[in-house]
Amino acid sequence: MSMIDRLYSTYIMTNCNNVVFYIGVSGSLVSRVWKHKKRIYSNFFTARYNLNKLVWYENFDNPRDAIVCEKRLKSWRRDWKIDLVKKENSEFVDLSYDWYEVDGFEREGDSESSSE
């Protein structure tokens, strides 16, 4: 890995009905997914279509490899993307569900954040 042990991720987000997909790449997957879930950028595709479930991701040591993977997946047919997700996540569960409680972020679905 690099000197700072940074991982680059290609990922797939979807909505609660698994109808719309978004494929992205990030150098900080935990932060990026949190931004999607919180609709930090309200005019972005993921906010407009309520894509708040992380259903697949792959980590890379090199950002170029993550970008190549992203471009490859974006060129795939929809059924190929669904098959890819189903291989590792057959129920399309949100792989990031418990990330934020542990890392000090409010977990999706929690109605109140702790201020104590």
Image: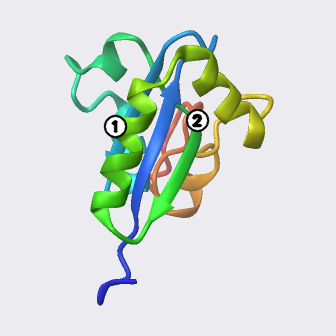
Using the rendered view, name the quadrant where residue 84 is placed.
top right
Please state which amino acid type lies under the numbered disc 1: Lys
- Percent x, y of residue 53: 55, 30
Numbered badge on residue 71? 1
Counting residues from the N terminus, which is met first, the one under dot 1 or under dot 2? 1
Q: Measured along the vertical axis of the image, is residue 2 above or below residue 51?
A: below
Label 2's element?
Answer: loop
Residue 87 or residue 111, whichever sits in front: 87
Q: Residue at x 35, y 74 (%)?
A: 6
Label 1's element?
Answer: helix
From where the camera sits, is residue 108 visible?
yes
CA separation, marks 1 and 2? 34 Å
- Percent x, y of residue 2: 32, 84
Residue 77 or residue 28, whichever sits in front: 77
- Percent x, y of residue 66: 37, 54
Which mark is in front, 1 or 2? 1
From where the camera sits, is residue 34 visible?
no
Using the rendered view, name the quadrant where residue 54 is placed.
top right
Numbered badge on residue 110? 2
Q: Residues within 10 Å of mark 2 (few under 14, many from 20)?
A: few
Q: Residue at x 64, y 50 (%)?
A: 98
Quarter of the image that includes the N terminus: bottom left
Q: How many marks?
A: 2
Please state which amino acid type lies under the numbered disc 2: Asp
